[in-house]
């Protein structure tokens, strides 16, 4: 008499954790030989699922077992979300960007990097979800070298970890990133805090004291908003608002520390950069509202600028 089908499915998923490529296909084939050969009912559905996973694993092995996977950059900054399998990365990306991503409560739902644009502080920022990194990623296991190459190009990293999961899974990811020589600005998103005990976040912070951690639940809009602010901080960007003289309409323009009126003018249009004589500025960098400044005036976050030609 076979065991209850739900229990069987849980055992199958447990057997597949951390397996990828040829190893995963071999395990799936072995599972298929062990299942009852029912043509109808729950066990027939399980056989169909396992067969589908074999086919997906074949495709995945061709896709990710390469030394690079190109992700076309969009926007002024790119932030990567990385973590163990099933750490809630897809749900976070979806919550911030409102794109529809296949999610499920088992590992390796995401097979390759997924990019999306989200507006933070008025500026479009690109987020890239990196599929779950596993031990041996630097040696190519699970397509690790290709995934690490994407991570290496990002301006910042958000490590994602299910706050209820063993911390060892997160340590594995941190170790693989360190072995790859990647040292981008980073934060830790402790996901699914709404399902965890009250002290779970503090225990995680104590286990990983070298990285700033924030608790986030996709069901809590305020925690998602706070997480978005933390992501914005990783970009190193600031926002100034530009408007034409005599107009009330403003547009956001990203800048980096130390950039000037001339830099903003050139970013808006090459000819405007050449013709710029200065600007009227309202905001933190101005001594008084509407101050007239020169081309070399350094702007600050939150300034409003009217370019003068």
Image (cartoon, rainbow, N blue to C red):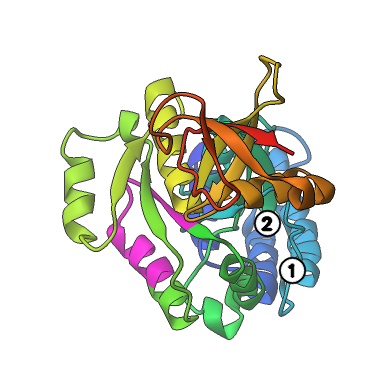
**In the current view of this chain or complex, which residue is farthest to the right?**
271
Could you tell me which secondary element the residue under label 2 belongs to?
Answer: loop
Q: Nearer the viewer, residue 169 or 189?
A: 189
Q: CA distance from mark 2 to mark 1?
A: 8 Å
* Residue annotated with mark 1: 69
Provide residue 60's location: percent of width, then percent of height. Answer: 75, 64
* Residue annotated with mark 2: 113
Compared to residue 250, the image places residue 51 above or below, namely below
Could you tell me which secondary element the residue under label 1 belongs to?
Answer: loop
Q: Nearer the viewer, residue 81 or 304?
A: 304
278 drawn magenta: no
Circles 2 and 1 in contact, beta carbons < 8 Å: yes
Provide residue 11's location: percent of width, then percent of height. Answer: 49, 52
Q: Which residues are magenta?
A: 157-174
Q: Quadrant of the N terminus?
A: top right
Task: Tell me how many marks there are.
Answer: 2
Q: Which mark is residue 84?
A: none
Q: Nearer the viewer, residue 272 or 175?
A: 272
């Amino acid at each position: 008499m076979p065991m209850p089908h739900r229990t069987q499915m849980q055992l199958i998923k447990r057997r597949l954790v951390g397996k990828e490529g040829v190893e995963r296909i071999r395990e799936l084939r072995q599972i298929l030989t062990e299942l009852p050969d029912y043509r109808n009912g729950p066990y027939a559905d399980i056989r169909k699922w396992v067969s589908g996973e074999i086919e997906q694993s074949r495709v995945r092995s061709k896709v990710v077992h390469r030394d690079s996977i190109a992700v076309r950059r969009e926007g002024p900054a790119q932030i990567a979300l990385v973590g163990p399998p099933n750490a809630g990365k897809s749900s976070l990306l979806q919550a911030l960007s409102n794109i529809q991503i296949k999610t499920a409560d088992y590992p390796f739902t995401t097979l390759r990097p997924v990019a999306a644009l989200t507006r933070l502080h008025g500026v479009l920022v690109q987020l890239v979800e990196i599929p779950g990194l596993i031990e041996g990623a630097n040696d190519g296991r699970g397509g690790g070298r290709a995934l690490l190459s994407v991570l290496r190009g990002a301006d910042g990293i958000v490590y994602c970890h299910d706050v209820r999961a063993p911390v060892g899974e997160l340590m594995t990811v941190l170790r693989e990133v360190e072995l790859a020589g990647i040292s981008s600005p980073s934060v830790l998103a402790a996901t699914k805090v709404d399902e965890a005990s009250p002290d779970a976040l503090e225990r995680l912070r104590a286990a990983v004291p070298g990285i700033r951690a924030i608790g986030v639940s996709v069901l809590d809009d305020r925690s998602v908003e706070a997480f978005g602010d933390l992501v914005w901080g990783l970009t190193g960007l600031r926002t100034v608002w530009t408007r034409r003289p005599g107009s009330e309409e403003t547009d956001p323009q990203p800048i980096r520390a130390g950039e000037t009126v001339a830099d903003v003018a050139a970013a808006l249009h090459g000819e405007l950069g050449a013709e710029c004589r200065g600007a009227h500025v309202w905001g933190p960098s101005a001594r008084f509202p509407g101050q007239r400044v020169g081309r070399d005036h350094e702007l600050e976050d939150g300034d409003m600028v009217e370019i003068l030609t």
